[in-house]
Image: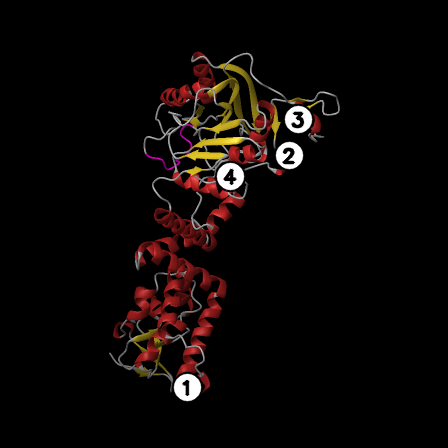
Amino acid sequence: MKTINLSPNVSVVAPQMLKKNSTTYSMYVVPVNYEEIRNNIREFGLLTPLLVNFEYEIISGNLRHQIALDLGLEEVPVVFVDAPEEMKAVLSVSSNQFRVKSMVEIASEIRFYDEYYSVGRGRRTDLSPQMKVVKDEKDTAYKSIGQYKINKIKSIEKKVIELHGNNIEILNRELSKIDKEETTLNELDKKLDRELLKKNNEVVIPAQYEYITEKVKIYNSSCGDLFHLGDESIQTVITSPPYFQMRNYGTGKNQLGLEKDVLNFINNLCDLFEDTKRVLKKEGSLFVNINDCVIDGQYQSVPELFLIEMRRRGWRYVDQYLWLKTNAQFTQGKRSVRNYEPIFHFVKSADYFFNDTWLSEFVDEKNNISMGTKMKYPKLVSGLDFRDNILKSAGSNTLDLRNKCLESGFLMEHSATFPLSLPLIFVLSTSKPGDIILDMFNGTASTGEISVLTNRKYVGYELNPQFVMASEVRLSEYELGEVA
């Protein structure tokens, strides 16, 4: 095979004579517009010459070379470049700037430029022509990528290294999700942030953590045995147990809510309320927020089965409230989206304490939680409508708390909280200042915050030490007395 000179600069050679460039061949995969490039070359030929050195190694044009071989072209135009060894790679990469590249390829380019062609701060490129070429090539490449994308990719790569070490396969797998439109750069960056914080939690969160003060006591233990509490010491219990087959709270494979059978879940849940009956005062109240779920296309009747079993075990069922929500969970299938959750009110005796006179001082002009507000004796209504942002607390109350936990050095992963207005209504209606309020499934102590704000004492039980730490962050800004 011979080289045919077309002009002082452009020659044609048989594509079989050329050697692939090892730098860019490993860096670039088949572009998303490969067929478009191939069809264009088939119709018009190779309009742009390949850059090669005098050893016939391709500096730029691996893709065009491969297409030429695929199409059976007998010859391709080339420009021979006498490039120094250290310049071959940068010419190879920079000449690929106008291809449609995958996120993996772009990340490879960024690493290449940062590793081999970064001009140190303060170094003068005007005194070194080669250094100026390097800077210009890098600036051109970075301009075509965009600074936002560069920053995000670098951030993602740094976080993957922190999580998994220098594992290029994991990094490429994560970046490929963007090309597949499974995520975005920003979403992937945030996901890795969360994973790093979870990894950090493994270090900063102890196996056991309790928060005990004069007014607040949160025990890192099961609520099945309330041995810390005396008989008939609690005035009001307000709680939201784990829902059946809905969420993993990180307390082990045998945790409540992960049972396979709904009746098994109901029995386990009701068992936990046996000792609650002992610690609750005769005039006390128990409020239980519980929800249903859809399995195999049908609801499991969790609230109804729970209510029947609690009554069978001797609890008096005196009321039911419907928490009407703004952030209802979308459900698939041929059914409506359920935008409420039931809250059952149980008591031990007919002589329970209930006083809703506080409503006469509460402004509820749209009757979101009451009726008769313009009359002498307003009353609560069963449908507690939080869709109009009453008491400025319509949905989850964890956003500010999550940020405060981050400032304290750990990630709070709990998100299933009810609005502070819910426990406020029940605390005001069924207890007096100085009484003790109990939440058997403390979570992040929403009920605890309301108890403190209304001059009550609070006791919580929580299996996850992370949630106890988050509760401390929530409550530590209040005057709680001496910490034990």
Residue found at the very far front of the displayed protein: 482
Q: Which residue is mark 3?
A: 358
What percent of the width, then of the height, locates residue 56?
A: 28, 78
Instruction: Give the overall secondary structure of the magenta segment.
Output: loop
CA gap, disc 3 to disc 1? 81 Å
Query: Which residue lies at the image location 49% right of the left edge and 70% below the top edge?
Result: 143
Q: Residue at x 41, y 19 (%)?
A: 274
Examine the rendered structure and indicate whether residue 386 appears above or below residue 278.
below
Q: Earlier in the sequence, mark 2 or mark 1?
A: 1
Amino acid beneath label 3: Trp
According to the image, label 2 marks what residue?
Answer: 390
**Is residue 243 visible to us here?**
yes
Tell whether 15 sits left or right of 292: left
Q: Which residues are magenta?
A: 244-252
How packed mark 2 is, by other alpha carbons closer than 10 Å (few <14, some 14-19, many 20 or more), is some
Label 2 vs label 1, nearer the camera = 2
Residue 226 in percent (x, y) is at 40, 25
Closest to the observer: 153 or 449? 449
Q: Amino acid at mark 1?
A: Ser
